[in-house]
Amino acid sequence: MATTTTDESEHTETESGLELRRIALYGALLALVGAYLSPLYSGLTTAFKTQEAYRNTSPLQPPLEGFTIDPWVTAGSELAFAMVNSFAMVIPAAVLSALFGSLTAYGLTKVDWRGQVFVLVLFLAAVFIPYQAVLVPLRQFWSMIGLSQLHPRGELVELTITHIAYGIPICTILFRSYYQTLDSELIEAARLDGASLARIYRKIVLPLSLPMFAVTLIYQFTQVWNDFLFALVLLSNRSNYVVTLELNALAGSMATDYSVQMAGAFIAALPTILVYILFGEQFAKGQTL
């Protein structure tokens, strides 16, 4: 009887200790979440304040006084045309880099030919080349080609082609890792039936690649949409500015309206947020394959 009472006491103490540790863990996680989200909350409250309210209140204080939506209207009107330019650039850049990466990975994985290991090494090396290392030769290359002199929108075409070229290596590596998991017997059976390489890709490999296309498209959309460095180097005409450049221009040269800047930042981030919300399930499936 005494032994049973002792066991129950020890069991109760163990459960109590586990409960305290669980509470401490959840408390620490909530503190980290609060610390992580506080800049986001501060920016959101600032975007709804007048300049006077921003100067006279704490950034974390809700906009109970001086509430206004004028910063959103101003930022939206300033960024509208740049958003159109960004969509005109990012959609073909993301789609074509993913498609070319898929085709290249197919050739490097499911087709045997001499020298493919060397080519794969080149693609791996290209993934790790930083943007800063190619800025000067990139600017010189497009100066020689002169697309910007042929058409007013030529600078935007240059930027789109640059992102396609720079995105192909990482898309190739992602697709290659995925294609290595595909059933080779299915492809061999199609070859024995007389299917060409192009037909095998179109009828077998491409339909099976849809989850990885979701991953690469989301990744490329985010990278290209948020790019600032290439756009800064290649775009000089204000009419060709993408959203990152126009957002930087909102800062002004003499005075800064932080409410407008914060509103502009949220507007500029909205497309990438929507992409993750709409295609997040496909993105998760592609990552687990």
Image (spheres, rainbow, N blue to C red):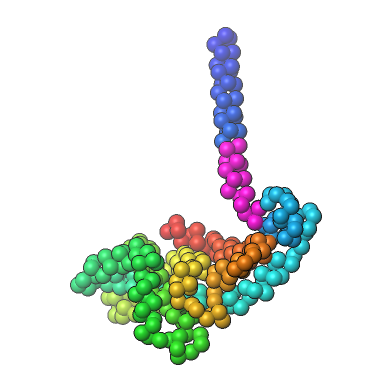
Closest to the observer, 87 or 188: 87
Residue 201 drawn above or below residue 43: below
Residue 32 falls in image quadrant: top right
Q: Could you tell me what secondary structure mostly forms the magenta stretch?
A: helix
Residue at the image point whose x is 57% and y is 38% from the top: 28
Residue 234 drawn above or below residue 27: below
Q: Where is residue 272 in the image (x, y as percent from the top left)?
A: 56, 65
Residue at the image point whose x is 54% and y is 71% from the top: 245
* Residue 26 horizontal side relative to residue 60, left or right: left
Query: Is residue 197 visible in the rendered structure shown here?
Result: yes
Closest to the observer, 59 or 204: 59
Q: In which quarter of the image is the C terminus?
A: bottom left
Q: Where is residue 287 in the image (x, y as percent from the top left)?
A: 45, 58
Q: Where is residue 138 in the image (x, y as percent from the top left)?
A: 37, 75
* Residue 108 horizontal side relative to residue 163, left or right: left
Query: Looking at this rendering, what residue extends furthest in the front direction?
Result: 254
Residue at the image point whose x is 59% and y is 21% from the top: 12
Query: Looking at this rendering, what residue extends furthest in the bottom direction?
Result: 150
**Which stretch appears magenta?**
26-43
